[in-house]
Image (tube, helix red, strand yellow):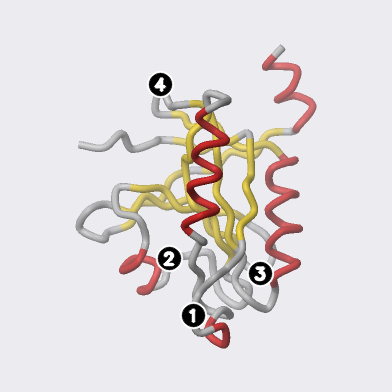
Amino acid sequence: MPFVPSLLCLDHQCLTLLDHTFGARSPDEGCALLLGPVPMQSRWLVNTVWPCCNVWWPPAERTSCFAVDPMEQLAAQRWGRGRGLQVLAVAHSHPAAAAIPSDKDRRLGLSDGLMLITDRDGSPLAWWLDGERRVTSIPVEVWDTRQCQEACL
């Protein structure tokens, strides 16, 4: 049984980077990888956003579909491993829809994995996709960056 998180935590700095990354891609869906320390408990902490290019083919469908370049995923994994981090989730935007997994997200998403979706306003929702292609909502906690940095000192 995979280790399902009960809470996804990120700070405003990560959320701001996601907003800018996804905003630059609009009206296409943007995508990114979210990295953090290897989870030792059910509370997962994201401390790094790895912006990715949406390589969905054909490009005309990128307004409602996304694909992360596998080479970018390998680079993020390699970079994170050297810093004690791992890829915790795949993030993407729904610039013209709610932050709820679409049928295509459920079909093509990484099973037994976490996805974070932002809507047109940048509001994040997290979802666990199980092996049966069902999704479960995971609460997202956004921290004040200063408080987060102080707590980590």
**Which residue position is annotated with label 1?**
57
Q: Quadrant of the C terminus?
A: top right
Q: In this image, 114 relative to 117: left or right?
A: left
**Which residue position is annotated with label 2?**
101
Q: Amino acid at mark 2?
A: Pro
Tags 3 and 2 in contact by the CB under 8 Å rule? Answer: no
Among the two numbered marks 1 and 3 on one chain, the one whose residue lies closer to the N terminus: 1
Among the two numbered marks 4 and 1 on one chain, the one whose residue lies closer to the N terminus: 4
Q: In this image, 33 relative to 132: left or right?
A: right
Q: Amino acid at mark 4?
A: Met
Q: Position of residue 22 (x, y in %)?
A: 68, 63
Q: Give the Cα separation between the discs numbered 3 and 2.
A: 14 Å
Disc 4 secondary structure class: loop
**Which residue position is annotated with label 4?**
40
Q: Residue at x 37, y 49 (%)?
A: 128
Disc 3 secondary structure class: loop
Q: Which mark is residue 22?
A: none
In the image shown, does 137 or 80 lie closer to the viewer? 80
**Which residue position is annotated with label 3?**
120
